[in-house]
Image (tube, helix red, strand yellow):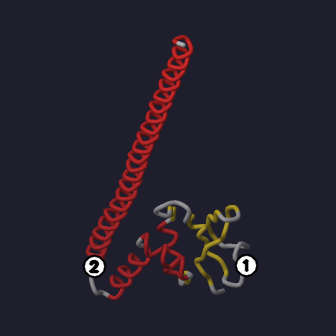
Amino acid sequence: MPVKIRLARHGKKGYAFYHIVVADSRAPRDGKFIEKIGTYNPNTNPASIDLNFEKALEWLQKGAQPTDTCRAILSYKGVMYKKHLLGGVAKGAFDEATANARFEKWMSEKAAKIAAKTQKLSADKEKVAKDRLAQEKETNEKKAKAIEAKRAEAAAAAAAQEAEAAATEEAPAAE
């Protein structure tokens, strides 16, 4: 039976959410599957992936073929690299301790990259909020100045009308 590791679509229209499943390649996309090994939500930034690492590695070692998207997800989580290292151990290229050390080093570097990305995204979000607030303050100041100018103009016009009315009242009284 040809087994695939692939995505099964869930969620609502326009807001997809996927289950990472191990299924017979002849089964429909959202149909019968052998085992669910994780979830993938591309709607968050960075995309959130919840994966059972051991089960995914076990299925890869049994010969399950991941689809292109699942291969990218498994690579992102380090399952493909771990499989590669275990292949090197099986061939005698290095021992298991070296493989684990290499994998731990790779995982720490990956975690640092992810942390840097999330930190950059939050900093960008804060910067956009500060810029928006500064622009809003500037716009409010311009509006306040325009309103003040209109009020001063209206007060000057009212004073001119009063002066004209007073001059008109005095002129008939003088005749």
Q: Which sits in the foreground, 125 or 167?
A: 167
Residue occupying image coordinates x 40% and y 44%: 138
Comes first in the chain, label 1 or label 2: 1
Q: Which residue is nearer to you in this view: 77 or 124?
A: 124
Q: Tell me: residue 13, above or below residue 91.
A: above
Which residue is outermost to the top?
Answer: 173
**82 and 45: which one is in front?**
45
CA neighbours of label 2 inside 10 A, class few (<14), some (14 to 19), many (20+): some
Q: Position of residue 84 (x, y in %)?
A: 38, 82
**Element at label 1:** loop
Q: Residue at x 62, y 82 (%)?
A: 3
Task: Kindly identify which numbered label has been placed on residue 101.
Answer: none
Residue 76: x percent and y percent? 43, 72
Is 128 placed above or below 65 here?
above
What amino acid does circle 1 point to?
Pro
Q: Which residue is mark 2?
A: 95
Q: Quadrant of the C terminus?
A: top right
Q: Is 109 situated left or right of 42 in this image?
A: left
Q: Tell me if 170 is positioned left or right of 2 in this view.
A: left
Q: Which residue is mark 1?
A: 28
Q: Is residue 3 left or right of residue 72?
A: right
Q: Position of residue 28 (x, y in %)?
A: 73, 78
Q: Find the distance from the CA under tag 1 to the CA under tag 2.
A: 41 Å
